[in-house]
Amino acid sequence: MSFITENISILKHQLPSSVKLIAVSKTKTVNDIIEAHNAGQRYFGENRVQELLNKKDLLPKDIEWHLIGHLQSNKVKYIVPFISMIQSIDSYNLLVIVNTEALKINRIVDCLLQIHIADEETKFGFSMHELCENLKSYNMLNLKNVRICGVMGMATFTSDTNQVKKEFGYLRDCFQSLKETFFRSNTSFEEISMGMSGDFELALKEGSTMVRIGSLIFGER
């Protein structure tokens, strides 16, 4: 058994059956991804559109690709035809562009709303106030070719587990508030994507439904 196969097996035993494991394959080779696929992994996350485009046609067609990095609006049209989920919707304008491109090909694209939860300015995402104002003021909920499935967030890169726990708890509370206020009748709004290799166990305790794991599967870069 290869170490990638073994790592996936270990993780799947740690994760509740209700939690999706997104294997973060950025910078990883096609062979590495095939090895993970052979181990039964089907969800893969990429940060950069160009890297994803370079890989996808060399890989099995049943892979469900998640875009988890910051998405530039001029790159949207390249991924809309095949992407399974865009986890990094961080502005109303970006959501509109995804909807416009999806409408052109009669497709509905699953999306998560990225909320800024970290004590780091370099990370992207809506503030909760901004997001609520967008949901009230714009026709965000009337866009027919995007399906808003939940929220995503990235905790601060720190060894302070109390801070990380607090940030994950905040994202969970944001999800609950949005669910009760804007998505009460939306059965698709059910995902909380939080937790990576260094903090996924904390994320699980705070209600994560998707974890984005790279180094614990593929090894350090």
Image (cartoon, grey):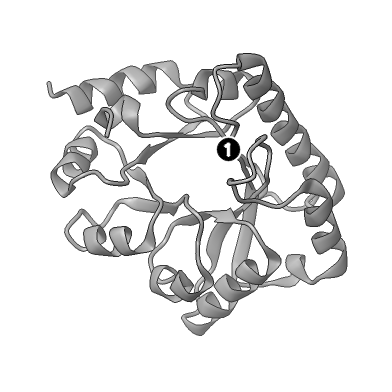
Q: Relative to 153, does residue 59 appear above or below in the rendering?
A: below
Residue located beneath label 1 in the image:
154
> Residue 134: where, in percent of width, then height?
80, 62
Q: Extreme bottom residue here?
A: 104
- Location of residue 131 (image quadrant): bottom right
> In the rendered view, does 111 fall on the left or right side of 79?
right
Query: Who's the residue at 27% across and 22% down the image?
Result: 7
From the top left corner, tell me how far across and down residue 217 is, in percent.
Answer: 29, 28
For the N terminus, give its image quadrant: top left
Residue 190 picture quarter = top right
What SS does tag 1 mark? Answer: loop
* Quadrant that contains the C terminus: top left
Residue found 44% across the figure and 76% down from its top: 77
Q: Where does the image place residue 110, in percent across and percent down from the top left?
A: 55, 58
Residue occupying the point 29% across, 64% down: 53
**On screen, 101 above or below 218?**
below
Give the tally of numbered discs.
1
Q: Is residue 8 left or right of residue 15?
A: left
> Observer-nearest residue: 21 or 164?
164
Kindly indicate the quadrant of the structure image that contains residue 159: top right
Q: Position of residue 112 (x, y in %)?
A: 60, 52
Which residue corresponds to the image point at 59% horizontal and 46% vertical from the top-left?
A: 123
- Give the vertical position of 160 relative to 150 (above or below): above
**Is residue 93 depicted above or below 12 in this figure?**
below
| Amino acid type, mark 1 | Met
Q: Within 10 Å of the Cα at label 1, are there few (<14), some (14-19), or many (20+) other Cα atoms?
A: many
